[in-house]
Image (cartoon, rainbow, N blue to C red):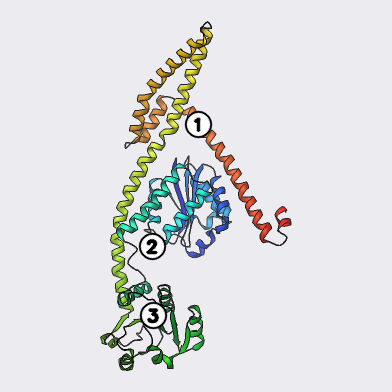
Amino acid sequence: MHIVVAGLNYRTAPVSIREKFAFVDGDLPLALQELKATKSVMECVVVGTCNRTELYVAVDTQHLCGHHLRAFLEKWFNVPKEQFNKHLYIYENEMAIQHLFRVTSGLDSMVIGETQILGQVRDAFLLAQQEKTTGVLFNTLFKQAITMAKRAHTETGIGENPVSVSYAAVELGKRIFGSYENKNVLIVGAGKMSELTVKHLVSNGANKVTVVNRTLTRAQELAERFRGVASTMDKLLTHLEDADIVISSTGSAGYVLKSEQVSCILQRRRSRPLFMIDIAVPRDLDPRLGDMPNVFLYDIDNLQSLVNSHMEERHKAAVKIEEMIKAEIAAFEQWSKTLGISPVIQALQTKASAIHEETMDSLMKKLPELDEHELKVIRKLTKSIVNQMLRDPIVRIKEMAAERHGDDALDMFTKIFALEEQLEGQKRAEQELRQREAEAAQERAKEELLAKVRHAVPGGDALAKA
């Protein structure tokens, strides 16, 4: 069995292409069933996020696998393959396994080490399990990838250091306040970076937001998003007296707050700490403010410097995770080599059993005078001879399959015992069973979809029948 992944991500395809390949959550069960029914596909998982769409499949043959996966994407999303071929990547076997581990642990993400993708991969796997499109191979592989990613984040702490300016600002504030609970945030200006920073502050406990802007309408628009209060620039000093955190991002050519203006306000604040974040270029806040008692001032360069140092730490952690991935790949490949033994051993035992039965039938024809007891004894003894003859070869092939050239050893074992026909018969039977299961699952998915239509759409019964 071979593992293949085909996909598009933020590195290979612009958003104008990626958005064409976004799976709708409600359609994923049917998509999984259609993918499972694709020729040669034995197991499958679909991972879809805003930054990637990936099809993970286990196939019984790699021949034309890429063609079949392209055809699936073309049909499902109704996009000609000529429009996405150059953006599509296809990895096979070890490269596919490595890719899954890197994706799950956040090493392939736009922000290295982010943890959201771990939950997304886990949810994709659980859905595939629910839809019965995974088997022994993917159940083991995806559980291993998810477990390793959790361990990697815990042991290396790769996701602990913030790598965005807004997150860095929030983390700096925690060093000052410990907690943002009941802290007042004053936004000066209504820039995008300010909006993002205050969003993180509010999510961390800050619960009072005041937006001061030259244009009151714009201040009101931003304040409404955080259930805050809007005000104009002429009230800035008044609001500063109650503020714990100031985020400034205006287009002013000069300082919005000068040290002499803030000096008198500090006397009335009674030594309460004031955390000031200047995200504007040119700067909004007088740099001399940072020299005042109980004022903690950070500008965009301070924050970016912190982000850069954190990114370096993440890259160091990533190197450790890459080593962990190598060990996990080796462990999985060791396990998967022994997985291929079962069909071969089963084929050998089936062939031996058939030969034994043929021999017993011939014996009964040649010696019709044998009674039931004698036949039973002979059957038992000859069966024991067959089992003893098979015992050592089976033990040896299990050992050899786990070694470096295990696949070659298994192939030679198959040829020596002439098991090709038995294995082909097993494969056909499994394919027929999978086809029946896929067809039944597709019918169930269609029935569920029709049931939703009946309940959700006026006149849904007539539409479903149509």
| Residue ID for mark 3 | 183
**Amino acid type at mark 3:** Lys
Of residue 337 and residue 120, the one placed in the foreground of this image is 120
| Mark positioned earlier in the residue sequence (3 or 2) | 2
From the image, state whether disc 3 or disc 2 is nearer to you. 3
| Mark positioned earlier in the residue sequence (1 or 3) | 3
Q: Position of residue 86 (x, y in %)?
A: 47, 56
Q: Quadrant of residue 37?
A: top right
From the image, state whether disc 1 or disc 3 is nearer to you. 3
Up/down of 113 relative to 445, above or below: below
The quadrant of the picture occupied by the C terminus is bottom right
From the image, state whether disc 1 or disc 2 is nearer to you. 2
Of residue 288 and residue 444, the one placed in the foreground of this image is 444
User: What is the spatial separation of the Cα atoms under label 3 and label 2, in whole angstroms?
Assistant: 28 Å
Up/down of 414 relative to 357, above or below: below
Of residue 171 and residue 93, the one placed in the foreground of this image is 171
Q: Residues within 10 Å of mark 1 (few under 14, many from 20)?
A: few
**Amino acid type at mark 2:** Glu
Is label 2 in a helix, a strand or a loop? loop
Of residue 90 and residue 321, the one placed in the foreground of this image is 321
Q: Position of residue 206 (x, y in %)?
A: 41, 77
Label of residue 424 in the image? 1
Q: Residue at x 35, y 28 (%)?
A: 395
Is label 1 in a helix, a strand or a loop? helix
Disc 1 vs disc 2: Cβ atoms closer than 8 Å? no
User: What is the spatial separation of the Cα atoms under label 1 and label 3, in whole angstroms?
Assistant: 70 Å
| Mark positioned earlier in the residue sequence (1 or 2) | 2
Regarding residue 11, the answer to whether it shows in the image is no
Q: Residue at x 59, y 46 (%)?
A: 441
Label of residue 114 in the image? 2
